[in-house]
Image (cartoon, coloured by chain):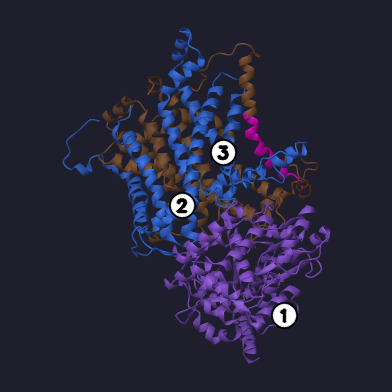
Amino acid sequence: MRYCSALAVLATSTFLATAGPAPATELEVTHWWTSGGEAAAVAEFAKAFDATGNHWVDGAIAGSGSTARPIMISRITGGDPMGATQFNHGRQAEELVQAGLMRDLTDLATKEKWTEVIRPKSLLDSCTLDGKIYCVPVNIHSWQWLWLSNKAFETAGVPIPKNWDEFVAAAPALEKAGIVPFAQGGQAWQVNNTFAVLMLAIGGKDLFQKVYGDKDDTVAAGPEVAKVFKAADDARRLSKSANVQEWNQATAMVINGKAGGQIMGDWAQGEFQLAGKVAGTDYTCLPGLGINPTLATGGDAFYFPLQKDEAKAKAQEVLASTLLDPKTQVAFNLKKGSVPVRGDVDLNAANDCMKKGIDILGKGDIVSWTDQLVSQDTQKQFEDLFSEFFATAMTTEDAQERFAKIVATAD
Amino acid sequence: MADVAEISGPQTAIEPRGARPRHAFSRRNIFIYGTLILVAVYYLIPLYVMVVTSLKGMPEVRLGNIFSPPMEITFEPWVKAWSSACTGLNCDGLSRGFWNSVRITVPSVILSIAIASVNGYALANWRFKGADIFFTVLIVGAFIPYQVMIYPIVILLREIGIYGSLSGLVLVHAIFGMPIMTLLFRNYFAAVPEELFKAARVDGAGFWAIYLKIMLPMSLPIFVVAIILQTTGIWNDFLFGVVYTRPDTYPMTVQLNNIVNSVQGVKEYNVNMAATILTGLVPLIVYFVSGRLFVRGIAAGAVKG
Amino acid sequence: MPQQKRPIRLLRNLNAKIAAVPMMLTATFVFAGGSLWTVLYSFTSSKLLPRFSFVGAEQYERLWAAPRWNVAVENLFIYGALSLIFQFVIGFLLAALLDQKIRFEDTFRTIFLYPFALSFVVTGLVWQWILNPDFGVQSVVRSLGWTNFEFNPLYDADIVIFGILIAALWQGTGLIMCLMLAGLRGIDEDIWKASRVDGIPTWKTYLFIVIPMMRPVFITTLVIIASGIVRVYDLVVAQTGGGPGIASEVPAKYVYDYMFHAQNLGQGFAASTMMLLSVAVVVVPWAYLEFGRRRHG
């Protein structure tokens, strides 16, 4: 591919240009990747960036995006911007861009032909505002996975389920064997996303789009969504004795066979890999919960706040192209458990689960995820609702009524 | 206000005043010591759990009983917490945060106490019109949740141009320490006998001369209280530290949070406990060393409304 | 204060005024200014950045319709009332016990006071570990034979606020005890002698003579406890994260979450304003009476 070799030349040329006597520029990069698999992945970025003669100053903030984002935003609005920062692309950084606090990357993007290499196209669309590009997507993450512990089902003496319904049916056997059927982390963002995953898998693409995309509150109050609430009720019942908060602790329960399964994004794979588990033999993954193999293409992206310092601004460009470099993309995404944003890279090293994901992406069975569809404000209201729903005995009818009300005022 | 307090002023007695004890094993004594020991156990349990867990290896922690003493003492969690626990790519534990905390705490304590002591002195001894209104606003400010003020302060620091710098954080600590500190000093100086102050004025001493030559030398107890309260308060601060600094100047509490919340694989409770104790060590030492002075100082100043 | 006639009023007490400049700036720009700014912007639809787009009382309507806010307010009342009562009672009782000319007073006092040296974050983490059902108190008691023992406050929505209260009392009562002790030591020995001569029982002396004399101590204590209650945040975040579900949410956390996580400043400011309002209703009249009018002594 033509542009691929062009890029390679460009990558090496920047490497040569900065490897000389040019002073190393330190660039502080903030992110919330602090779990084992995530840290290993981000180390790949740092390594690649340091190899260009600059220096990656790691600004990890622990405790998930909802802890880290406020800190990042106050730093940017407070006039002390970092060199680059992670956000989930979509609407999280929209206003910062509108306020002119973020750097316009359009020139670099044109030069490196991002519109041609990045796929699916929707990723770059989420980075674009008024025709200008403001962020670099680095991976494709999808939430719609059910991770199952093969060991747990063997212990319980039941076959490994092939979809959500079988999973629910197998739960009593797990419980009898002293295994928590469903490991659900208690944090609000996790329960909220579990519900959205159920919506897409059980309700289907159209229903998902009508509720989250068109914000149609009649549909949200209707019988189709009631079915999804029924499934959420199952999930609530099966996770009753889980007592975990963090997602990776819930994943650890699945890894150790203490829990039957977990709904979590593909980053959970990084944890399985780190624990030396093999897809297919130790664990099973069901994209779209085995019902409706449609994936949402959310993901992480890097934004580059405007810098006064000329050298830093230069280093930002170098970092932007390093993040998209084919080699870095592969190295990073293999460790992270996500899919590269470039369609032109070699992924032979990918494992079974990743290949399943890549297949679905290739078929184009994709939707935009809630991060892109609704505002953070609406997300928070969903989070409040579902964290209450999962922790109490709220009836599905009450919950659905409140859900529809939020949808009616969503933006 | 009790007369005795007024006369003895800062040197308020701290001797016990209750009824005298009679027999060593009277019913009364058994009741008193029994209750105290029972309560002391409740207070000590968390410290005990922290210390014991931090000295166990992970396999032993996983066995379960958090109250059992370690079968095999290991200091590895301490070493790890101090020098090699990871957040993201930074694997230098709490060591860096310790020095940052020192660099934040020392100037903040000095600045906030300097401002508050002069301020309290002005309010107590040199009253001027309007002072009460400002002071009332200040006291009400003590009740305002910090979260409410985060945004206005971001704007304020940005306009001054010190957002993200150490001096910005020091200023924030000085501002939020002001209400309670000023109240403390104002009450203390108000209890200084009026005659002393009048005599100095007759001698022609001015505002600063009286402060430096008369007030300062006799206000050691209240300074001790102020230093203790501010040192622990600022050392323990998390919210300001995380919002108004950048990663290379993160205080220890922020790093503690980072270490505890960066779960890489399994939660290492022993390292977390060691990190927790290490972070609390400085204020703990301050209290253990100066506990007696603290009560004396409080008796002298804080309790006079 | 001796009054002398000076030509320019502003210059009278000039040094004192200069000394009070930091206070004036802080009071005006930070506390008053920041509060006013917050109130003003609570009537806008500001999202991630403050914008003056007036929407009337819309944010308030939404606030009071939000189940989470109502839970938070209710929790604050329960937590506040209990914490006020318990801190006062326990603090006073401990101080009274320590005031009985006992041995090892220093040791006991240090034990009761040391948790105050630890931050709320540390307090929250430690009690989260101790109350964890899988390896904390519950599992230990069960392993001793009481297999039906049930003590799981952090994962039970009905009693989670008590789990937080246990930790809060552990952290804060020591300081209250210290204040009370200092107050008790400020009572004249003669009063004790007189009451003993008159044959008044000890508990009656405390209740009817000593406690009324300790009014200033109680006021300082009240300020400290009450300001801590309104601001409670770190402890909840560290210990339960507001969970299970939204059972242990508090107003300060609502403010923070909506301002920064939900990126809806307007909503956060509306919640802030409600907190400021409640503080103002209770504190301003009292602070004015207490500090505004009376001359010391």
Give the percent coordinates (x, y) of residue A165: 71, 66
Residue type (three-letter) at the residue carrying disc 2: Gln
Q: Which residue is mark 1?
A: A347
Residue at mark 1 to residue at mark 2: CA–CA distance: 47 Å
Left or right? Give the position of A352 relative to C9.
right
The label number, if any, that marks residue C261 in the structure image: none
Quarter holding residue B212: top left
As drawn, the chain in purple is A
Q: Which residue is mark 3?
A: C171
Q: Which residue is mark 2?
A: B147
Residue at mark 1 to residue at mark 3: CA–CA distance: 54 Å
Residue type (three-letter) at the residue carrying disc 3: Gln
As drawn, the chain in brown is B
Quarter holding residue C215: top left
Q: Who's the residue at 74% across and 49% down the image?
A: B76
Residue C23 is a magenta residue: no
Q: Are marks 2 and 3 on the same chain?
A: no
Q: Are marks 1 and 3 on the same chain?
A: no
Question: Mark 1 Cα within 10 Å, few/some/many (few <14, many 20+)?
Answer: some
Viewer-proximal residue, B165 or A87? A87
Q: Colour of chain C?
A: blue
Residue at mark 2 to residue at mark 3: CA–CA distance: 21 Å
